[in-house]
Amino acid sequence: MHTDRFDQLFDSFKDIKVGVIGDLMLDTYMWGRVERISPEAPVPIVALHGKEYRIGGAGNVALNLQSLGAQVSVLSVIGEDDDASTLRSLLSSSGISTSFLLSSPGRPTTNKTRVISRNQQMMRLDNETTADLDTPDERRLLDAVSRWLSDVQPQILIFEDYNKGVLTEGVIGVVIDWCRQHGVITAVDPKRKHFFSYKHVDIFKPNLKEVREGLNLLEEELTPAHLLAVHAQLHSHLQHGISFITLSERGVFFAGSAAAAGPTGVADSAGPTGTGAAEFGVIPSHIRNIADVSGAGDTVIAVAALVYAATKDVPLMASIANIAGGLVCEEVGTAAIRKDQLLQECKVLL
């Protein structure tokens, strides 16, 4: 792919309207120093000297999409509390639409508070509920999705499931059906609880651990032929379009729906040809100085969804998302991808 084509592709992201539906979170970081042990109990006393709020959960996917230039809305249910106000403010100031973000007095806003001393996490405090939305809140969320589809006329909806109760069985099935009727691409980063609920989704992006748990696989083999068999098993349950499985330091595996029937004679590893011809392949990861893998999956699905929406080219989607996942692992903590950096890396590596 010529470098000018990458410029055109990345410029096209600004015209893509995308929604993120799922479990929004507030991440709170509290920094301090430990100089003594408490006389009340054998625990360290942390003298705090800093505090920071960040967007977490499904919101980190929205941040990555916004960083790439897309027009982003979040669709979720949070609480009616101080954490909700903080989260709304952070989203709005980041250029993410909260027009379809609902509040419910019956649910706390998920807040994960990390206490850190000398770059080491001492403790994490989680304030959350994992109960499914009740019926009234479920109906309100579906109404918000319906309004988003008609008012915004988007191209993509990404499901971000952290098992906190926003994505119920009912919500998942109805919303995928609506998106198919409206011609909206659907992508999902699944968790174990609803692993097989995302029937007919366009892009199914689990990591290898989630696939092994979901399919009860014991074997460790990671050959393209084995991964293609895994794709076929997933397809038999989901009838989805594309399997996109992240393999940690080994890269990514992709397969389109036509590959579910078995090997098609293409090479074991497909490169970014720009033709969309390859049905499946394994793309190795690029050598990186890994600092922190947290949030890499959020970046991968954001990049994959945008590239696929713009090109419908599955190998290219996998190649660029693979680069993006490696780039954010060079940053400490959860970090959104930088558009200019990703563009430059694509020009060099692809």
Image: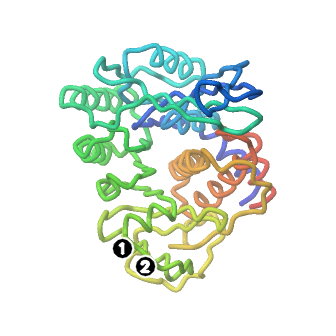
Query: Label 1 near label 2: C-beta < 8 Å?
Result: yes
Look at the image and tell me in which quarter the C terminus lies: bottom right
Q: Residue 104 at x, y = what percent?
A: 31, 20
Q: Amino acid at mark 1?
A: Gln
Considering the numbered disc 1 on the image, is that residue within a helix, a strand or a loop?
Answer: helix
Q: Residue placed at 40% from the left, 68% from the top?
A: 257
In the image, residue 124 sits, relative to residue 177, either above or below, namely above
Residue behind mark 2: 229
Q: Residue placed at 51% from the left, 60% from the top?
A: 207
User: Badge 2, how many Cα within 10 Å: few under 14, some, many 20+?
Assistant: some
Q: Residue placed at 29% from the left, 67% from the top?
A: 237
Q: Nearer the viewer, residue 265 or 208?
A: 208
Considering the numbered disc 2 on the image, is that residue within a helix, a strand or a loop?
Answer: helix
Q: Residue 129 at x, y = what percent?
A: 35, 32
Q: Nearer the viewer, residue 302 or 193?
A: 193
In the image, residue 318 sits, relative to residue 110, either above or below, namely below
Give the alpha-carbon distance from disc 2 to disc 1, as whole Å.
6 Å
Q: Amino acid at mark 2?
A: Ala
In the image, residue 258 sits, relative to residue 167, either above or below, namely below
Residue behind mark 1: 233
Can I make out residue 58 in this image? Answer: yes
Look at the image and tell me in which quarter the N terminus lies: bottom right
Q: Residue placed at 48% from the left, 69% from the top?
A: 255
309 relative to 341 in the view: left or right: left
Can I make out residue 159 in this image? Answer: no
Q: Could you say which quadrant of the image residue 150 lies in?
A: top left
Q: Residue 66 at x, y = what percent?
A: 59, 32
